[in-house]
Structure formats: C-alpha cells, structure tokens
Amino acid sequence: MSDKATLIYEGRTIELPVVRGTEGNPAIDISRLRAKTGLITYDPSLANTGLCRSEITFVDGEEGILRYRGIPIEQFTKRPDFVEVIWLLIFGHLPNKEELAEFSTLLTENELLHEGLRHQFQYIPVDAPPMAILSAALTSLAFFHQEFLAVEDIESVIQAAARLISKVRTIAAFACRRSLGLPFMFPDPKFRYCANLLHMMFSIPYKQYVVTPEIEDAINLLFILHADHEQNCSTSTVRTVGSAQANLFASCAAGVCALWGPLHGGANVEVIEMLNRIQAGGISPEQCIRDAKNKDKPFRLYGFGHRVYRHYDPRAKILKDACDRVFAQLHRKDPLLDIARKLEELALTDPYFIERKLFPNVDFYSGILLRAIGIPTNMFTVCFAIGRLPGWIAQWKEQHADPTAKILRPRQVYTGPAKVDYVPMSERA
C-alpha cells in the first residue's frame, strides 16, 4: 500500500502522507495542507476527521467491535470490576494485585466531600437537574484540591484521578438524595466502589440497603461498558478543553456538560420515555415498527442505530443478558422490557431496518437495567457520567503527555457577507 495520497487541484499535484493505526485504519495527514495549498477541508460534525492518535480504545463499527487497550469488551463480563478497568484505561495495563489494592484504598480514603462543598448542596433547588449539580460540583472540586490544578507526574495523576473518581460517586448520590428530599447518606468504607454508590443512594438512617451480587455486578458492568468510546462528543470536548492546558477538573466538568445532551448521554432516557408512551397508549410493537418507517408519522424509534456502529452494538448484547440476570434475581417482570424485546425481534427481521443497519444500541437496554435497579430516570445520565469519567481522564492524560499536542483550533468556511462599510446611526434606514 502507498504511504502517500495524491491531491490534484487547479493543475497542481500535491502528495499527502498516509498514516495507519495498528488495526490498519488509514488516514490522510492534512496537517500541512493549508500551508502547501491554501486549502482547508470541510467536514461538518468531523465525521471523517481524526482528532488525534490514541492508544486507549478501538471501535470497529462495521464489525461491532469495542476494545479497551486491545482487550475485547466481552472479556470484562464474567467478573466485572469497574476499578480494574479504570486503572487499565488511565495507566495502560491491567493492574497487579498491589496496584489494584492501593488504588482501591485511595478511592476509599477520598470518598468524603470537603464540608464546604457538602454544605453547598443546601443552596441548590430540590428540583435542580442532577447533571447541573454534577458539572458544578466537579468544577467546585478545584476550590478544595488546588494542588492538582497542575498535574505533571504519574503520582499526582493517580492522586487526582482517585479524588475525581471517588468523589463523583458521592456527588452523584448526594444529587439524587437532594432531588428526592432525603437526608444524605455518607459513604461506607466497607463497601466496594459500586456497592457504595447504591448504599449512598438507597440506604436510609434506620435501614441499610442490601446490595446483592447480581445488582452489584450489573452496575459494575454498566459502568465498564460506558467507560470509554473513542472520540465521541463528550470525550472530544474534554480533549478540546484540555488542549488549552485547562486542569483536569475543568476538562471533565466540560465533558459532563457535553454528555448532558439528549443526543448523547440522555439517549437512554428517551428510550424509557418512548417505552412508557407505548405501554400507556396501548400501542402494539408491530404498529410502532410500521410508524417508525412512515415519514408522515411523528413516532420515532429510539435506541436503534448508532453514529459509529453499522452492526449490532456489542454493549447492547451484554446489557440485554444483564437485564435477564437482574430480573431473574428480582423475581419480577417489566412490561417495558417485554416491549423492548419484541421491538428488537421485529426490527431485526424487517428489511427496512436491516438495509439501513439499524440495530439496538447501548441506550436501548441501559435505561431498562437502571430502572430495574431503582435508579431514578433523572439520574440515568449521571450514571453514564460516572462510567465515562475514567475514559475522560485517560484521554486528558494521553493528550497532556503528547509533546506534539497543540491547542485545538478548527477552521471554518466563511459564508457571511463580503466587506461592507459601517453606517452611522443617522444614515440608517
């Protein structure tokens, strides 16, 4: 294969280097294009533009592949351990026993919020969106941990990451309790990471919430499946903010704001609301499929199709199986899950969906799983953020360590008016 691409423009021939990743995905290096030709590329939404070189996550949308540091996502499902995956993503290798134990201890030691930050919750309206609370609180962490505004060595990265990843769980639980008008439950050091989150969300002063192994595994799995996903909207936002050498707290808070959007982290909420409307309206799955194909109908089928995957999202398969295990342990059924299963069955055999490669994505089952566990709908995107935080930190760290990294500054194709003269107020019509 050639290592150069040829561009012919106005009779000139320009050679551009071709760079290749470890999986063979080639890219034309246009970093010198404007200098050589005066041209820029036009790529709305950057769907065909490589933002960076990264060693963290590999996605093959055509084949339905997702790997963390080369490890297929399916291999994390037997004994899911979110903390192990956190270390893998941020530091590039699976932790040994000592590394895992030490990092777990750091998470436990840093689970409490500074009293100044905790008291801020009393001034937040009870109906405040939890994602607004989360983004504000992550930024506020910089008040109390100014020693980590500049992170220059591996030990300070470990310390800063431990604080963010541990405290985001406490902030999330407090945001949930605030929205429900319930007293805050402090973290309990005897619980592991995910069990502690559930304890803080669901325990009450006179009754301890009992976390079953099935539920704990499901939350671990949910966080693992959301931990990183290449250069999505929120991750590229973290990199954009980080490229200005903004600190880790500010960069991750920006990621939360990007994740908040219904087209990104809020998509599973749309799925649950859709399933609720179907159940309440007595609409059959068959009718939903017909309406989804009819452009004249307002019905929209959420949870199918993905910007990257042109195959079945591997995360959706894993979460579908997790739903079965959780509902079996809870000894109950969910009519929304029954509707979702039927919709999937119909879509996977319908030529319209097959030809357009519209398969279930991660959002199709994640909301049902969170709902089964008892997570309020307004906390779904917050749970997504907890899971995605290690990926944001890993991406920020990778960018920060790159000696060639520059501040991100995209170009534009200007389509406004040509030069016009200023008109004094007295002469304006």
Image (cartoon, rainbow, N blue to C red):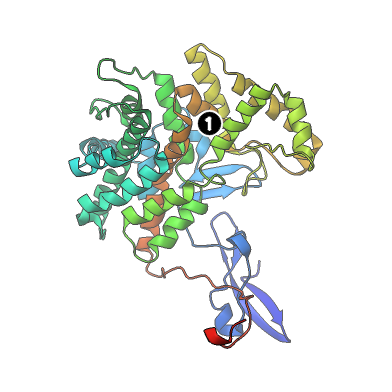
Q: Which residue is depicted at the point 62% across and 80% down? A: 39
Q: Is residue 78 above or below residue 421?
A: above
Locate the N terminus by quadrant. bottom right
The picture places residue 173, in percent across and down from the top left corner, at: 34, 33
Residue ID for mark 1: 367
Q: Is residue 221 something one can see in this rendering?
A: yes
Q: Quadrant of residue 400?
A: bottom left
The picture places residue 233, in percent across and down from the top left corner, at: 51, 53
Answer with left or right where residue 351 lies relative to residue 18: right
Q: Is residue 348 something one can see in this rendering?
A: no
Q: Is residue 231 above or below residue 37?
A: above
Amino acid marked by disc 1? Gly
Q: Quadrant of residue 34?
A: bottom right
Q: Which residue is depicted at the point 53% across and 83% down? A: 425
Foreground residue, 143 or 393?
143
The picture places residue 97, in percent across and down from the top left corner, at: 28, 35
The picture places residue 428, in percent across and down from the top left corner, at: 59, 83
Q: Which residue is depicted at the point 53% across and 12% down? A: 332
Q: Secondary structure at mark 1?
A: helix
